Amino acid sequence: MNNQFIPVNTPLLNGNEEKYLIECIRTGWISSEGPFIKQFEEKFAAYIGRAEGIAVSNGSGALDVAVQALKIGPGDEVIMPAFTIISPAQSVVRAGATPVLVESDLGTWNMDVSQIEAKITSKTKAIIVVHIYGLPVEMDPVLELCKRYGLYLIEDAAEMHGQTYKEKKCGTFGDISTFSFYPNKHITTGEGGMIMVDDATLAERCRMLRNLAIESKGRRFIHHELGWNYRMTNMQAALGLAQLEKIEEHIVKKREIGLAYDKGLKGIKGFQLPLPHTSYAQNIYWVYGLIANSEELALKTVKHLNEKGIGTRPFFWCMHEQPVFLKMNLFSNERYPNAERLAHCGFYIPSGLGLDAKEIDIIINELIVCGG
Ligand SMILES: *Cc1c(COP(=O)(O)O)cnc(C)c1O
């Protein structure tokens, strides 16, 4: 019998986290001026394979900076998936630009890239790809469109630390790519994010925007543009450095969790499981999601699991069904049935790095009770 609640996520902090954090306290380096920031930026950029990393206070802020750094604003359209976390859409809306949505692929749960070109107009300035839950977006057609139409590419790789598309790391594809280090990601800094670029001028611009748009040359506190305070602290970077030392182990562990669920749930009725792979990638199982055959079954299952002490999270909600955007007269009367299906019938089960085999068995058994 399971008496203990199994949370949807538990991080793993069993490396040098404590040691590096104590160093922050002993040396007094706790702000963003501390030495771990640069080390974490350089090491994470080297791991991903980008020239520059700019550490920020969260992954959503990384997207705000990305949009502003590329001077996306009023009159511009930005293509992105209908099914995503709100972060990329809110960055675009706040910048005064217009998000243009694309339907989802029911197999990978990512944007259906074959439907992008029909959405391109003379106003389109950028495409934002969001790799969702474990499989990357099919990048080749997107890269080809960006080149042919002269569009910027922003890559939200917040769930893809270490994942590859055709052997090339996610986070290397965008003019600007972004990561999050929230505690449920493959590595965490508590809260945190990173902006990745190759161009030195663009990197300098992102650093400026992260820091209230204070310019590195000229008199401090004179501003020519509005920025943000999205600086990461040295304490967060300390955690990040320790986590980065373990990233390969974390990836192996997440894939083991995914495969254990796949095996235990094989043949279950009433639910679609994640694809273990596509022709271009192995699933990295950031989270293990299921799509119920009906909204009713999804609700019933989530309720049952909760009663049994098993945490779940519903999937993201579609952008064209967000009350906040409907109030702004965005996306009125637009329909994306695949995205709606994911949002209405999808949920994920405990997927954190702290999960053990016994807990996985309990979860599988309770799911089978609901499905059959
Ligand atoms: C987690 C996540 C974010 C946001 O990151 P925060 O650090 O929580 O702001 C953005 N995009 C995607 C796809 C995410 O999964």
Image: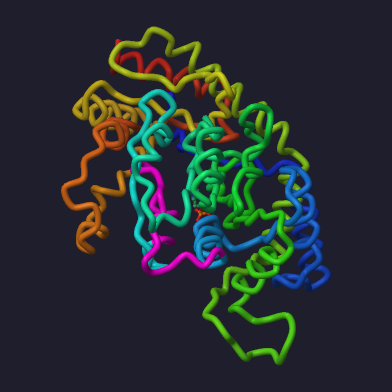
Identity of the residue drawn at 75% across and 59% down = 21
In the rendered image, residue 301, in percent from the top left (x then y), is placed at 28, 26
Instruction: Specify the farthest residue to the left.
Output: 333
- The quarter of the image holding the C terminus is top left
Which residue occupies 58% across, 29% down?
A: 284
> Camera-side residue: 353 or 59?
59
Q: Residue at point 60% right, 56% down?
A: 193
Q: Which residues are magenta?
A: 70-92
Q: In screen coordinates, is 105 left or right of 146?
A: left
Residue 348 at what x, y percent from top left? 40, 32
Whether residue 73 is in magenta: the answer is yes
Q: Which residue is outermost to the top?
A: 267
The mark total stands at 0
Q: Is residue 256 visible to the viewer in this orientation of the structure?
A: yes
- In which quadrant is the N terminus drawn? top left
- Locate residue 147: give its quadrant: top right
43 lies left or right of 201:
right
How far across and down, in percent of the image, does residue 30 sit? Answer: 72, 70
Q: Viewer-proximal residue, 270 or 52? A: 52
Vertical relation: 308 (above or below) 180: above
Residue 112 magenta: no
Residue visible at 62% across and 39% down in the picture? 170
Q: What coloring was used for the rendering?
A: rainbow
Residue 181 can be seen in this image: no
Q: Where is residue 12 drawn, in percent x and y?
A: 64, 40
Dividing the picture into quadrants, the one containing residue 77 is: bottom left
